[in-house]
Image (cartoon, rainbow, N blue to C red):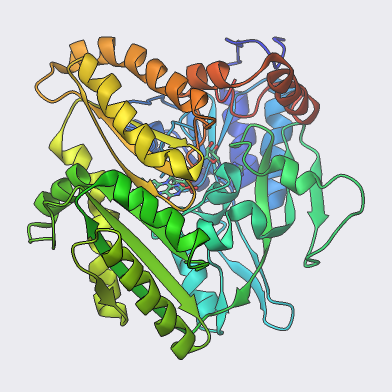
């Protein structure tokens, strides 16, 4: 048997006996083998990560997950956990065949506990559906990845997902108070619960969050909630100068001491791409950058005072106009272009490589300009959008006019140069999307030997036979 730490472990192909055992665990109808049934499990939303499993197993309970993992350990079968496949780094795509273990059938809310501001949920639940369900009870789960209508809460836990509201409210790990599931070893666990403070030894739930399905399969998640803020307003602020937009972000926080729920920056190229995709004019699409500010609270007067102050400051710092949206329809319209950017870029250029870097907030415009220069030296372009409040930028290296094969050959070296720039600026190579299979080279660049060794030790302790999501992260 190969060790968990091998870079190319050998796994046992699924034979008839293993398939029969899986069918005994889950029922034959939830063990998929036909190529057309397996196709959805051969990719996520990353454009080139591909891998075909020998079976996809749709587990419906922790008992089934535990039994599948026990079998995998006995027979050395590779297991790839999967939520709803919206990942952007190939994390839920099998690298060594074997079994994709999907939790899509485990999608129930087990309990909304209003008195304790808590929700207990199965991992396959769509994040946006969870949000709507708790909002109906006057409660708030603020983590809002742009994929929230299609990703799962278990996938969010596995990737420690964030979103625009991370600036004020934090990311997934800040809401997980309890986690239940099965380790790669096949051992079940139930850690934490509804308590919002817990200093009882190591916090093992937090150690598992963000491990991208390489350590455990989450089968039940307890999240803390907040009271739903009733007043929300958004501002759209077009700037002619990217650096002025960056200075405005700093001024809003430091000088006005305003804490927006979301603080986004969209570079002009991205705005124009979104405009094409939306097939309608976007206001000020010729600007160098759009800043979006979302303000929320309980007191309408207080929120409006902040809206006015934020708008006046923006105009004094070079914003062309202040566009305000304060009802759901207008707010949705204001965010539409921002939400469309990724699809728009994908549609606009077949030669592209997406990244998800984070730098100290004040350095974000400087990084974007440096990235454009680095790209231009190789006859490529760089454009970006993202969470200005967090310094987290989703940017794309584009090869307009390039042949796809040539771009695939030339772009990795440019990406390495860009990652070196990120690290030189005190940044990190992923703010939200993780490492998966496609960013492992970048992780090696960014991570010291001791840090990497500790990550491997944690993985080996939880998954001694290396059966869980092999070929990812390391
Ligand atoms: C248009 C678009 C916008 C996006 N915007 C954002 C954003 O704003 N912020 C952000 O953070 N991400 C974003 N993403 C990325 C993606 O949606 C998130 O990473 C999300 O958390 C993945 O959830 P999923 O259910 O689709 O997981 P999958 O893609 O199925 O899996 C992702 C990883 O989690 C593991 N996994 C899934 N479920 C479990 C489980 N129950 N137990 C253990 N491991 C598990 C998988 O093995 C894999 O490594 C975006 C993606 C798209 C396509």
Residue drawn at (22%, 14%) of the image? 378
Residue drawn at (49%, 63%) of the image? 255
Front position in the image: 53 or 415: 415
Residue drawn at (43%, 77%) of the image? 306
* Camera sees residue 152: yes
Front position in the image: 350 or 299: 299
Residue farthest to the front, as pictured: 316
Q: Quadrant of the N terminus?
A: top right
Q: Is residue 448 above or below residue 259?
A: above
- Where is residue 290 shown, x and y percent of the image? 26, 55
Please identify the quarter of the rendering in which residue 364 is found: top left
- Residue 292 located left or right of residue 270: right
Q: Is residue 29 above or below residue 404?
A: below
- Where is residue 231 shown, x and y percent of the image? 44, 83
Q: Is residue 448 above or below residue 161?
A: above
Residue farthest to the right, as pictured: 200
* Camera sees residue 97: no
- Residue 245 located left or right of residue 100: left
């Amino acid at each position: 048997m190969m060790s968990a730490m091998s870079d190319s472990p050998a796994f046992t192909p699924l034979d008839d006996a293993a398939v029969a055992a899986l069918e005994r665990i889950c029922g034959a109808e939830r063990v998929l083998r036909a190529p057309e049934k397996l196709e959805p499990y051969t990719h996520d939303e990353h454009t080139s990560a591909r891998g075909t499993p020998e079976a996809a197993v749709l587990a419906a309970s922790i008992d089934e997950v535990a039994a599948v993992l026990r079998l995998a350990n006995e027979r050395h079968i590779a297991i790839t956990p999967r939520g709803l496949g919206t990942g952007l780094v190939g994390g839920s795509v099998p690298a060594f065949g074997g079994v994709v273990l999907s939790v899509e059938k485990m999608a129930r809310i087990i309990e909304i506990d209003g008195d304790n501001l808590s929700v207990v949920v199965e991992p396959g639940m769509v994040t946006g559906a969870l949000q709507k369900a708790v909002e109906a009870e006057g409660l708030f789960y603020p983590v809002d990845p742009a994929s929230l209508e299609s990703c799962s809460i278990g996938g969010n836990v596995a990737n420690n997902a964030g979103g625009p509201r991370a600036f004020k409210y934090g990311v997934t790990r800040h809401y997980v108070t309890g986690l239940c599931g099965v380790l790669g070893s096949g051992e079940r666990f139930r850690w934490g619960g509804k308590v919002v403070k817990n200093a009882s030894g190591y916090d093992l739930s937090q150690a598992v969050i963000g491990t991208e399905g390489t350590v455990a399969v989450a089968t039940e998640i307890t999240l803390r909630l907040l009271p739903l803020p009733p007043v929300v307003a958004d501002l759209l602020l077009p700037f002619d100068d990217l650096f002025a937009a960056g200075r405005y972000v700093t001024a809003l926080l430091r000088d006005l001491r305003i804490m927006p729920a979301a603080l986004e920056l969209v570079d002009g190229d991205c705005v124009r791409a979104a405009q094409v995709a939306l097939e309608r004019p976007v206001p000020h699409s010729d600007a160098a950058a759009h800043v979006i500010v979302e303000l929320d609270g309980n007191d309408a007067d207080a929120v409006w005072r902040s809206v006015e102050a934020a708008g006046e400051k923006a105009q004094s710092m070079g914003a062309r106009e202040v566009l305000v949206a304060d009802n759901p329809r207008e707010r949705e319209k204001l965010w539409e272009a921002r939400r469309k950017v990724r699809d728009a870029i994908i549609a606009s250029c077949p030669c592209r490589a997406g990244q998800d870097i984070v730098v100290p907030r004040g350095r974000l415009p400087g990084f974007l300009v440096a990235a454009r220069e680095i790209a231009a030296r190789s006859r490529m372009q760089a454009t970006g959008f993202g969470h200005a409040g967090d310094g987290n930028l989703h940017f794309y290296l584009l090869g307009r006019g390039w042949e796809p094969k040539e771009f695939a050959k030339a772009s990795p070296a440019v990406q390495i140069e860009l990652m070196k720039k990120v690290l030189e600026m005190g940044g990190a190579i992923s703010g939200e999307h993780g490492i998966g299979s496609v960013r492992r080279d970048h992780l090696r660049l960014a991570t010291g030997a001791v840090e990497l060794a500790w990550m491997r030790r944690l993985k080996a302790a939880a998954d001694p036979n290396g059966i869980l999501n092999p070929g990812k992260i390391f």
